[in-house]
Image (spheres, rainbow, N blue to C red):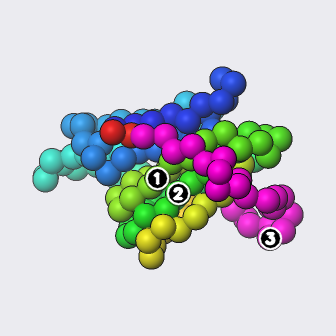
Amino acid sequence: MVENIVHEGQILSIIVRNSFNPPGISFFTPDEFSQQLALLKHKAGKVIQPHVHNPVLREVKFTQEVLVIKRGRLRVDFFDDHKNYIQSAILGEGDVILLASGGHGFEVLEDAEIIEIKQGPYTGDKDKTRFEPAEHFQIKIISHE
């Protein structure tokens, strides 16, 4: 199952649930995203031809990050570009999320191990603007069932 979190025509996030299991190759991101996300599913014996990546100049204006939930559960809160709360989703073991635009925050619901993948180089505090989380009474969980 794949969920696009969209607000006013802008993709805030793409969630790929652990239960998503089609054959072949599935790309989830538009070609213009600076971070590309795909699921590659191959049978034993498949040979992927060796290759190198050519130097291609790319311009990255905003950081997009991917989180892989190895263990645990967490709530992700989505915000628009103006820091207004939109909605939330629960992520569990094996789920993958691409945080594409807008803002986001998290509350860990069960002890978690998370792998984070994003563009570099990391510039520390220059890389993000922090703001107050959503109030508990505002939280609206979207269901993926």
Q: Nearer the viewer, mark 1 or mark 3?
A: 1
Q: Residue beneath label 1, please?
A: 90
Does residue 90 show up? Answer: yes
Q: Nearer the viewer, residue 138 or 85?
A: 138
Dot 3 and dot 2 residues touching (CB under 8 Å): no
Q: Nearer the viewer, mark 3 or mark 2?
A: 2
Q: Identify the residue at image location x=45%, y=60%.
A: 68
Q: Residue beneath label 2, please?
A: 75
Along the polypeptide, which appears first: circle 1 or circle 2? 2
Along the polypeptide, which appears first: circle 3 or circle 2? 2
Residue at the outermost front position: 137
Distance from disc 1 to disc 2, alpha carbons, whole Å, reads: 4 Å
Q: Is residue 141 left or right of residue 73?
A: right
Instruction: Give residue 128's quadrant in the image.
Output: bottom right
Residue 8 x/y as whole percent: 69, 24
For label 2, the SS is: strand
Q: Residues within 10 Å of mark 2 (few under 14, many from 20)?
A: some
Stretch in magenta: 120-143
Amino acid bearing label 3: Gly
Residue 49 x/y as whole percent: 31, 48
Q: Identify the residue at image location x=60%, y=61%.
A: 106
Distance from disc 1 to disc 3, alpha carbons, whole Å, reads: 27 Å
Does residue 100 show up? Answer: no
Q: Identify the residue at image location x=70%, y=55%.
A: 135
Distance from disc 3 to disc 2, alpha carbons, whole Å, reads: 24 Å
Quadrant location, the C terminus: top left
